[in-house]
Structure formats: C-alpha cells, structure tokens
Image (cartoon, rainbow, N blue to C red):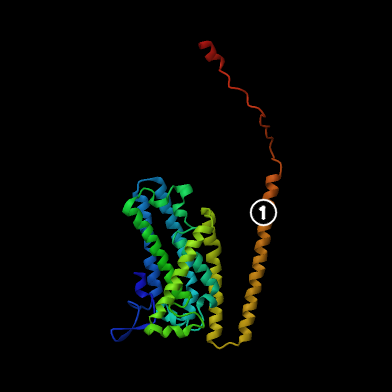
Amino acid sequence: MAFAVIPMSGPVKMFGQETAFQLTDIPVGVLYILSVASVGVYGIVLAGWSSGSTYPLLGGLRSSAQVISYEIAMGLSLVAVFLYAGSMSTIDIVNAQDKFWFAIVLFPSFIIYAISMVGETNRAPFDLAEAEGELVGGFHTEYSSLKFALFFLAEYVNIVGVSALATTLFLGGYHAPPGLGFTESWLGGWFTFIWFFIKVVLFFFIFVWLRGTLPRLRYDQFMQFGWKVLIPANVAWIMVVAVLRYFTINGASRTSILIFGGVVLVIFLIGSSLYERAKAKKSAVGVSVVDAPAPYPVPELPMKISAFTVPRAERERE
C-alpha cells in the first residue's frame, strides 16, 4: 500500500502515452505512508497476546513501545524535508531534489531517520522485541510453519518500504546521482527505475550489514536513546531549519545566514561540553560513593563454611 504513492521512476512511455510510474499522488502522501506503516504494530501485539505465553506477550509489548517511541523521531525527521520541499507530496519532494539531495542539505535529519527506521523495523541492533537471549524468540516464539514465515515476510517487506521512503525523501528518488543526469533519458525514461532500485538495495545492504556487525543494545539504553537523544536533537534541528528557511525565503544576505549558523554551532559546542562535564562529575560521584566505607558496622563473612551438622533433636530421635 505504501508503494502506491512512491514514484519509482520518472515519466515513461507506455503504449504510446507518457505517464508517471506511480499509482497515485496525493497532497499528503508521506503522512499516508507513515499511517500505513504504523498499523503493523497491531499484528505484533495481537500475535504475542494470542499465543497465551509470557515471552511472546513481553515481546509484543516491547515491540509496541519501541515502534511508538521511534515513530515520533521518524516523523520529526521528516518535518525539515517538508519545510524545504514546501509540500508533503512525494513527487514534489523528489522534484525538489533535482540539484541537491536532502541527505546532504538536511544531513542531521537523514541520520536521525536512518537510525529510526532500524528501530521501526525491529532489526539488529534494535531487535529487542525478539531478543533470543531474553525472550527465547520474541512475539513469534509459539508460531511455526506458514505463520512463522509470514512474520519474517512482513519484516522484510517493511524494510523495503522504509528503504524506498528514505530513497524518495533523502536520496533524490529516481533521480540519477550528481554528474550522471544524462542517463535519465535512456530507455525512454525507464533507466531512472534502475537508479531507484540501486538506492533501495543499498539501504537493504546496510540493514544486513548492521545485523552482522553491531551487538544488541540493552532495552533501557535503547529507549533512553530514543527519548533523550533523538527526539530533543530533532526538535532543536527543526527550529534551526525553520529559521534558516525563513532567512532564505525573505532574501537575507549570506553573511547573516553564516552568522546564525556560527551562533548555533557555538551553542552546540558549549552544550556538548557542559553535558560531558556533568556526565564526568556524576560518574566521579558514583565512584566515590561506592568506595566510601559503610556508615554502619558490617560483619565479616566467614572464610570457611562449616560442615552441615544434624540437629541434636533429630540425633536423639534416631
């Protein structure tokens, strides 16, 4: 359903007519994709609950909390794209990247989206809903045969969907890389589909690469990273992009834009320095508290445990 609004190539010729290789285009196409992708969590939760087992239920609850948390960061990362493109239509966003890809212009948004889409799809190192070491197999522990295969098929279809959305929003969609724009007219426009396919396969390779290289995070670290790092950083970046976009639309000079960028950079460096100092101070306090002697007497542990002796009452009974 998400691919209905994703343009997979430029205008192509079919049966003597020139048409877009896209099923339909709606003004809120990106919001439609996000809403369709968010429905999948219902299947995971209901699958874990209907198993009648503890581990699948815990896996389903983990998955619901994980998807909801990282969908917020994913949605916020797209706000900067909407501000620069001036539209929520997928074809308008692709056309706005004819000169520069948003992955370069809006690099922080691209990084946040890339992290969020890994958490959204429950893939390593964020596959905490199916952690084998803790929950046996997660929400699909009690499933086998065709039902088990359908879970894996849905997971990989979701990966392809978020990869296609990332290609559309940040990598220029079906547009060729810079310097290779002359290839877009090859094969009557059909060659642009090859560029779109290569970009999606590149994201899919990154998913497989992450699964084979990074260890799984702890659940509390994963949730803290989403709520305390990604979302605040996203909100701050949206404010910066909004101000820069306002300056650009109103014809501000390049000097004023550079001054604003320098001020933002200085504030970021100062905030990072203060955060690192507070973190170091907190760790030092924690070490001193652990090493300090206890305020109450602690008995010494016996160095040797005596052998078990039979109570006197039992000996007399025998």
**Residue located at (65% from left, 58% from top):** 279
| Disc 1 element | helix
Note whether residue 72 is visible.
no
Q: How far across and down, in percent of the image, does residue 313 sit?
A: 54, 14
Compared with residue 205, is residue 306 higher up or lower down, i.e. above or below?
A: above
Quarter placement of the N terminus: bottom left
Question: In which quadrant of the rendered view does residue 187 lie?
Answer: bottom left
Outermost front residue: 187
The mark tally for this picture is 1
Measuring from the top left, give residue 119's x and y in whole percent.
47, 61
Which of the 4 quarters of the picture holds residue 184?
A: bottom left
Is residue 154 rendered to the left or right of residue 274? Answer: left
The spot of residue 296 in percent (x, y) is 68, 37
Kind of residue indicated by mark 1: Ser
Relative to 183, does residue 214 appear above or below in the rendering?
A: above
Residue in the image at 47% along x and 62% along y = 208
* Mark 1 nearby-residue class (10 Å; few <14, some 14–19, many ≥20): few
Direction from residue 279 to residue 120 in the image, left or right: left
Nearer to us in this view, 303 or 234: 303
Q: Is residue 277 visible?
A: yes
Q: Picture coordinates of residue 234 (x, y %)?
A: 53, 69
Q: In the image, is residue 151 above or below residue 193?
A: above
Tell me which corner region of the image, top left, top right, bottom left or bottom right, holds residue 150: bottom left
Query: Which residue is label 1 attached to?
Result: 283
Q: Residue at x 35, y 56 (%)?
A: 149
Determine the residue positioned at 56% across, 71% down.
236
